[in-house]
Image (cartoon, rainbow, N blue to C red):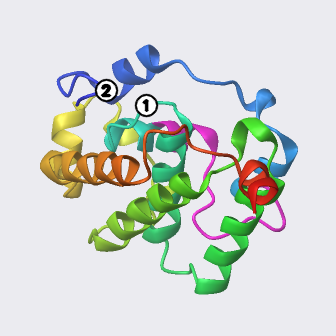
Amino acid sequence: MSNYNPNLTLNQALQQMGGDPPSSIHWMVRLLENPASPIALPGNVDLHRHDYLHLLLDRGLSLDDEAFVIGFTMGNDPATKPWHLASFKLVSWLLYPREYRFSWMQLKIFDLGLVYGRSLTTKNFNRLDFSPYFNQTLAQLRSHFGIDSQTLASFEQVEQILKGQSGSEPIQTSQECLAGS
């Protein structure tokens, strides 16, 4: 399922995307994910590049989509170590504000993004200067960077399978999981 018309330029798609202004992002999220933070983890990315990655990866704005994109940026940064991943998962599962908190399922989706980010030849998308690409279509950019739409669709199918295996119950938050144990 396509979220963004691949024939739109990067700039046009960004205009249609919407999203949150930087000022609305919770300080704890910015602490780990924003390059301006002194303790930002590898894969950290400013909000504009983060939005461009949503477009290139054809991901919407749901928490599942956030999990995939963040997993992608961390996986695509060669500086990411296992302890970075464990730290991020722990904080995003237990400490992030409720509206940003990842469930167990979203941590699995994060892992799918991580795998895809690691698989691409181009590294450090989180630091890529996108300005030369503003007038190229999403399809052209995906082709240029080796981002395969069929592979992205396959990852979304895996997500649906994982969600189906977890039953038809709604995905629980970390707090609900802990309360139930």
> Does label 2 or label 1 sit earlier along the sequence?
2
Q: Can the viewer see residue 32?
A: no
* Span shown in magenta: 35-51
Tag 2 and tag 1, C-beta contact below 8 Å: yes
Q: Position of residue 100 (x, y in %)?
A: 70, 42
Q: Nearer the viewer, residue 12 or 70?
A: 70
Horizontal arrangement in the rendering, residue 4 relative to residue 169 (left or right): left
Q: Amino acid at mark 1?
A: Gly
Q: In front here: 178 or 40?
A: 178
What residue is rendered at 71% in x and 47% in y? 101
* Residue drawn at 75 percent across, 48 percent down: 176
Magenta-drawn stretch contains 2:
no
For marks 2 and 1, give the CA distance: 6 Å
Q: Residues within 10 Å of mark 1 (few under 14, many from 20)?
A: some
Query: Which image quadrant for residue 24?
Result: top right
- Quickly name the residue at label 1: 60
Depth order, front residue of 106/115: 106
Where does label 2 land, which residue? 3
Compared with 119, 1 (above or below) is: above
- Quadrant location, the N terminus: top left
Q: Is residue 39 magenta?
A: yes
Amino acid under label 2?
Asn
Q: Does residue 131 appear in the picture of this structure? A: yes
Return the residue nearer the eye: 88 or 42: 88
Determine the image quadrant of residue 19.
top right
Q: Residue at x 34, y 47 (%)?
A: 164
In this rendering, the answer to whether 138 lies above or below 130 is above
Q: Position of residue 25 (x, y in %)?
A: 76, 35
Q: Position of residue 89 (x, y in %)?
A: 66, 66
Residue 47 is drawn in which quadrant? top right
